[in-house]
Amino acid sequence: MEKEASTEAPKSTQESILKEETITERKWVKLEQTTYVDPTGKTRVWESVKRTTRREGVSADGVAVIPVLQRTLHYDCVVLVKQFRPPMGAYCLEFPAGLIDENETPESAALRELEEETGYKGDILECSPALCLDPGLTNCTSHVATVTINGDSPVNLKPKQKPEFVEVVTLPKNDLLQRIEELVTVEHLIVDAKVYAYALALKHATDTPFQVPFMKF
């Protein structure tokens, strides 16, 4: 007599890391090979890139800043930076961002990077937990801090950035996505995913919701 075939799904194995090996390492990054167990219990190998600069006592590698410039009788604007990125071989449009120093809070790092890259002094509105950036490639993490800038304050009337190879780009918040797409067309920039996702979310937040048509019987 044949046994009745089981309809139960095979039990999955808890994924786990078996070992991590450095393939090569340079000043800023290293290439690693990770051996791990997949859900079926099979041993697999994954290659990844990791920073060598992660400091002690910090919750993430870096912080990105969403700076909103507020001025009397002006539309609120988002302050972005444009800089040449060698890995992309092109200029990129990004939020001000940078690495967190040892024992520095994400909030302090956000305000420091904002002032260094744009010259503006701001106030923290909120800060995210540590977020992954490209988890299929790297373990790099970042906080995202929203900062308000009082554009009427004397310290922000003529902001002076530190000598960095970045150009400050200020765009109206209420028309951010369209203005970004115009810049891309004219200057052939590559837009950072965080910037585009933020602009897209702003657009969706103000769009008319999809209307469900009444059904006729």
Image: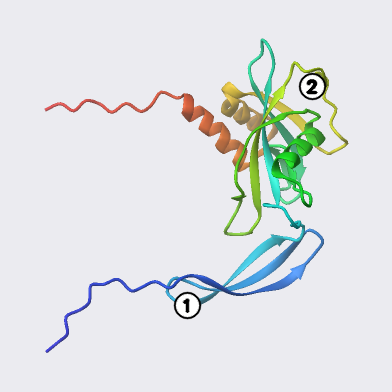
Q: Nearer the viewer, residue 3 or 213?
A: 3
Q: State which quadrant residue 116 falls in.
A: top right
Percent x, y for residue 70?
Answer: 67, 20
Q: State which quadrant residue 124 falls in.
A: top right
Answer with left or right where residue 185 lies relative to residue 117. Answer: left
Q: Secondary structure at mark 1?
A: loop
Answer with left or right where residue 100 lies relative to residue 164. Answer: left
Which residue occupies 57% across, 29% down?
Answer: 177
The residue at which mark 1 appears reads as 42
Neighbor class of circle 1 (other Cα within 10 Å; few <14, some 14-19, many 20+) is few
Quarter of the image for the N terminus: give it: bottom left
Answer with left or right where residue 132 lies relative to residue 205. Answer: right
The residue at which mark 2 appears reads as 156
Which residue occupies 64% across, 41% down?
Answer: 144
Quarter of the image for the C terminus: give it: top left
Percent x, y for residue 25?
Answer: 77, 67
Q: Which residue is situated farthest in the top direction here?
A: 73
Q: How is the image coloured?
A: rainbow
Q: CA distance from mark 2 to mark 1?
A: 57 Å
Q: Amino acid at mark 2?
A: Asn
Percent x, y for residue 130?
Answer: 62, 49
Q: Amino acid at mark 1?
A: Lys
Q: Secondary structure at mark 2?
A: helix
Q: Nearer the viewer, residue 101 or 204?
A: 101
Q: Badges 2 and 1: C-beta atoms under 8 Å apart?
A: no
Neighbor class of circle 2 (other Cα within 10 Å; few <14, some 14-19, many 20+) is some
Q: State which quadrant residue 190 falls in.
A: top right
Which residue occupies 60% across, 46% down?
Answer: 129
Answer with left or right where residue 150 lies relative to residue 193. Answer: right
Which residue occupies 16% across, 80% down?
Answer: 4
